[in-house]
Image (spheres, coloured by chain):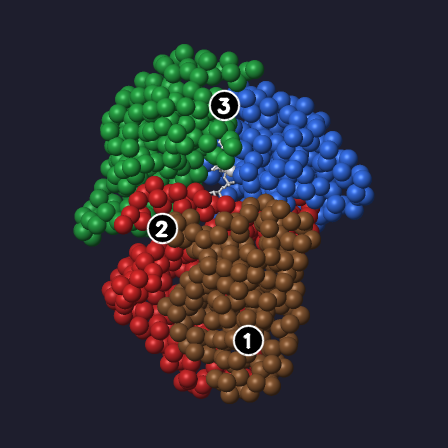
Chain colours: A green, B blue, C brown, D red
Amino acid sequence: MDIRFADCSVRFGDKTALHPLTLTLTERRIGIIGLNGSGKTTFARLINGLVKPSGGHVLVGGLDTVADEKRVFGKAGFIFQNPQHQLIMPIVEEDIAFGLKNRGLKTTEITERTATILARFGISHLARRRVHELSGGETQLVAMASVLVTEPDILILDEPTNQLDLKNRALVASTIESLEQQVLVISHDLSLVEDFERVLLFDGGRLVADGTPGEVIARYRELAAC
Amino acid sequence: MDIRFADCSVRFGDKTALHPLTLTLTERRIGIIGLNGSGKTTFARLINGLVKPSGGHVLVGGLDTVADEKRVFGKAGFIFQNPQHQLIMPIVEEDIAFGLKNRGLKTTEITERTATILARFGISHLARRRVHELSGGETQLVAMASVLVTEPDILILDEPTNQLDLKNRALVASTIESLEQQVLVISHDLSLVEDFERVLLFDGGRLVADGTPGEVIARYRELAAC
Amino acid sequence: MTTRDLVLIALFAAIIVFLGIIPPITLGFIPVPITAQSMGVMLAGCIIGARRGALAYLLVILMVAIGLPVLSGGRGGLAILAGPTAGFIIGWVVGTFVTGLVAEKLVRESQTGVRQLTGFFIASVIGGIGVVYLLGIAWLAFVTGLGIEKAVLGSLAFIPGDLLKAGIASLAARAIIVGYPLLPQRA
Amino acid sequence: MLKSLYVEGRTPLHAMSVRTKLVMLMAASIVLFFVTSPLALLPVFILCAATYFTLGLPLREAFGRVGWVLFAILILALATLYFDGARQAAAMALRIGAVVFLASAITATTAISAFMDEITILLQPFERAGILRAADVGLALALVIRFVPEILDRYANIREAHRARGLPMRPLTLFAPLIIQTLKDADTIAMAIDARGFRRQ
Ligand SMILES: Nc1ncnc2c1ncn2[C@@H]1O[C@H](COP(=O)(O)OP(=O)(O)OP(=O)(O)O)[C@@H](O)[C@H]1O
Ligand SMILES: Nc1ncnc2c1ncn2[C@@H]1O[C@H](COP(=O)(O)OP(=O)(O)OP(=O)(O)O)[C@@H](O)[C@H]1O
Ligand SMILES: O=C(O)CCCC[C@@H]1SC[C@@H]2NC(=O)N[C@@H]21
Ligand SMILES: [Mg+2]
Ligand SMILES: [Mg+2]
């Protein structure tokens, strides 16, 4: 799906979080890297309309994130930097079902789709667990399931390997690999994006490099070394 | 300073988080690694008495963490896995001063020591900032300053490079390097501990490897690959 | 109402439920306990403001009504909303609203700490003590047949504790307006 | 108490409709209020406790869930004993105890989403009158139940931070960061609710 930024900028009060940017993203695997506070999260949130541009437009599959807000939410799923805040029902399976219920599906279909997605992520045993008691890795997988169950066309993950050990990192990485959707990943864990088609590097609210993982990651290392 | 575990174990309810362990730590730089839930945080919390042994004893510089609780707290400073949970006052400099005020120091001395530690960490510009508005890297540095201002003999850091970019990682790593104190670091970021004197590997609540970084990290990679 | 207001209301209701975990103190001469939950009135009014604060208490009352034991001492159920303390409970809602109104009037972010503290304390005393007692004592006296004199005298026992709560709540509200101001962004 | 969430099972309570259970709970809490004889309350208490303990929860967890409340009731009972005598104290403890066990049994056998659906239906008249949005109330209720345990954890964390830094525990330094940290989550939670489309009209 086409994601287009047309002269898009973001200000919070008198702070410019993102300088005007024009860009089209069509690749299936896109990485976003940069220093803390460089604007990665802000950029990614523009895509599903969680942040609104202060200037310019963002078009997702031709829909404007401001004018067609409601429809854009359904197109792009977002996994937060701290996914435990994203799970808002007390029990895993209720949380996953809730997104479907809101779309007015029938109970039998909701139950079926919930079970299917849990099985696909290999977390059927977590169905009746309390959200608040999940470990870091489990939380990440449940958050992915709860977003993917509504079948968005695009999935955006904000630092999905935070606090995870090597094993859970590999699990999340391989789960991402298996998705048919278009995926954008923000990460400080560079190994996660090194096989992607395209990587964007942000610095001080500006896109400063855009290309293959090899060259962009090298550029990032230079930047971080100053 | 000598940290001694004598046949020490920890249970939470009917779950054993740490199996009986006998061990003495004297090195100045100690790394702790292992999978999620393997018992790293539990082990480290034993050292400053935040977790009490269910069996056995922990002695820090000859003091028992149970019998001499109060004095042990002063000896070992702890930086939490999520350091924003550790900052108690609303403004950075108030938080740092708070630990001192409580030790009955005079106002002039408190002001002076607060300013000194902020300067040493290169964060004097953050003095009047709101704690909750700090970025991840800033929060980590402020938490370190607020603990070190009380001059503990031992410093324990639980995943100090979480959510940090390469630059802030390097900053935290070099700050750790510059400390005179004995330092224990828990981390999934293996590069942080690879120059340490000794590394411990936990798995399922057991210490399964203990030695030089090279061999222990190799062992961890094997373990994570299964 | 924005989603953020909805969430703030729910989270504050959760804090009020949390305050209920502190066991109540029962007094012999009046069928109303001393409870930490009445401090929530002052906190909610001073921190999230009149409208959101009052709604947070209404949410707690809804939970009581459907039988969830969210009041101190694990009490809950419709019977409580007809019992001797019901006036105080309704007073919590109105009291929070009034605390919030007064705080929104008196306190500005630009003021000195002392003025903010004074403002919060006055708001807490007017809403969290004045209004709550007015409704609470009236119900207690007339509906339970205790008589106005006995009800007023008995309630004097709450005054020291409630002044202390007003003090703590004002200090907390002041720390929060410094560290995370919410009051100015009215709902 | 609010921790007492759903447990899997096939008891009669599981099979009952949410409405029946709610009516039962409301009725019990009203009727028991007028019963003052400990002898009449005792069998009700036993019935409620037995219902709760036979839901299939491990005994330790079953006690863990109501531990705090039982402790509070005990204190309440001791005070009543001192001021009003044994009869009153026994009646009070049995009455509240029965309702607590019944409420815990009902929360443990009812999924929160079922609760929400029922409340949304019950509040329909208010929605039609334009007073509130019934679905919002259900959502708010679920959020409280979801986040009370989180607040308990956070409180434990803040106490630990005090201990680790050698600070004295004062109500102010315990409550203020607790409230700031809790409310700070509101932004992210609200964003998540919007992102997942939970409040679409
Ligand atoms: N809601 C907001 N209000 C004010 N400033 C904000 C807000 N959100 C972000 N900012 C500021 O905008 C800048 C970019 O923030 P953003 O979260 O996009 O950075 P990031 O690249 O994701 O950083 P990190 O790697 O630390 O997650 C930062 O300086 C941040 O402080
Ligand atoms: N307070 C507690 N109550 C019950 N169980 C606990 C408690 N603290 C830890 N545990 C359990 O003990 C085990 C070890 O936990 P610990 O936090 O020490 O792991 P860790 O190695 O630090 O993991 P991570 O890398 O995810 O931080 C886990 O299974 C955890 O769920
Ligand atoms: O839990 C209840 O049933 C309601 C108790 C009401 C207690 C009132 S609120 C004002 C006053 N201050 C107290 O501490 N207790 C009373
Ligand atoms: Mg970010
Ligand atoms: Mg840990």
- Asked whether C89 or D65 is in front, the reply is C89
Amino acid type at circle 1 is Leu
CA distance for labels 2 and 1 = 38 Å
| Mark 1 on the same chain as mark 3 | no
Along the line of sight, which residue is nearer the eye, A78 or D55?
Answer: A78
Chain letter behind tag 1: C
Q: Distance between the residues labelled 2 and 3?
A: 36 Å
Q: Which residue position holds label 2?
A: A89
Residue A131 pos. (x, y %): 39, 48
Instruction: Tell me the subunit letter for badge 2.
Output: A
| Percent x, y of residue A203 | 48, 21
Q: Name the residue under label 1.
A: C134
Task: Point out residue D169 in the picture as x, y percentages from the top left corner.
Answer: 66, 53
Label 1 – label 3 distance at C-alpha: 57 Å
Residue bearing mark 3: A204
Pointer 2 with pointer 3, Cβ within 8 A:
no
| Near-viewer residue (A121 or B163) | B163
Give the quadrant of residue C127.
bottom right
Q: In this view, does A17 lie to the left or right of A175?
A: right
- Residue at image position (44%, 27%) is A18
Q: What residue is at 55 percent from the left and 24 percent from the top?
A: B169
Indicate the secondary structure of the residue bearing disc 3.
loop
- Looking at the image, residue A191 sits to the left or right of residue D13; the answer is right
